[in-house]
Amino acid sequence: KQEVTQIPAALSVPEGENLVLNCSFTDSAIYNLQWFRQDPGKGLTSLLLIQSSQREQTSGRLNASLDKSSGRSTLYIAASQPGDSATYLCAVETSGSRLTFGEGTQLTVNP
Amino acid sequence: DADVTQTPRNRITKTGKRIMLECSQTKGHDRMYWYRQDPGLGLQLIYYSFDVKDINKGEISDGYSVSRQAQAKFSLSLESAIPNQTALYFCATSEPGGDTQYFGPGTRLTVL
């Protein structure tokens, strides 16, 4: 059974800091890995999707990497802003379009 | 208008009551999903449907049932609600081929 773990569970940083969120998974037989952002009352928004054949994806200040063989991914946020405050969820897709989610990292960026 | 909508957004009910949560989408996707999220935990898959005639159980389907009334509509029912079904419920849609899933805003359900 696929298990996804995210570290840390919570993170508080001052505005402007660069930060890294970590995700690990137990079964390397994945189709892709996705990072989502969850805001209260607004559901989940997909940030980055890395196919299993890819090593990284970038979108603006966000960069996600994938090391499938070691079962790890990182989400790098550059120059953090208060608007980045949210819960960040990592999910891996296995057969049948099924996503397995981690517990999330709750990020607070302080002005 | 939102692509994936859920009704109701909040619901408080009592143990033993039958509850239906509804999901509608305008994205034209064939695949739809129901998840639940408990505090401090990730999302867990309850049921998923790849088309109107295809329904599949997820990780935690016990105590739940679903109905795919049309391509755009996927309902989740709790036949006899119990307090440990208190959670945040999300509906999602996707297309086949490795695309992401698109989530609704969620329904917060409280069972007393």
Image (spheres, coloured by chain):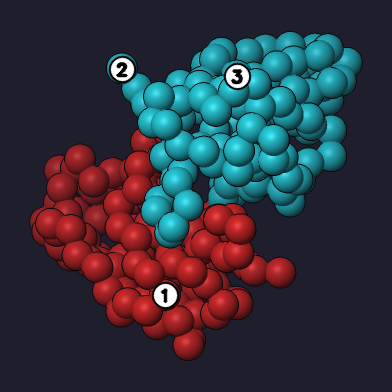
Q: Which mark is residue A52?
A: 1
The subunit letter for the residue under badge 1 reads: A
Q: Amino acid at mark 3?
A: Glu
Residue at left 67%, top 12%? B12
Q: CA distance from mark 2 to mark 3?
A: 17 Å
Give the quadrant of the N terminus of chain B.
Answer: top left
Label 1: how many Cα within 10 Å (few below 14, some 14–19, many 20+) = some
Residue at left 81%, top 14%? B18
Look at the numbered disc 2 and give the secondary structure of its residue.
loop
Across and down, in percent, residue B71 comes to 55, 28
Picture quarter containing residue A105?
bottom left
Residue of label 3: B22
Q: CA distance from mark 1 to mark 3?
A: 33 Å
Residue at left 45%, top 81%? A68
Chain identifier for the cyan-coloured part of the image: B
Residue at left 15%, top 43%? A111
- Are labels 1 and 3 assigned to the same chain? no
- Are labels 2 and 1 assigned to the same chain? no
Q: Which mark is residue B1?
A: 2
Across and down, in percent, residue B42 comes to 56, 50
B38 is higher (above) or lower (below) than B71: below
Q: Amino acid at mark 2?
A: Asp
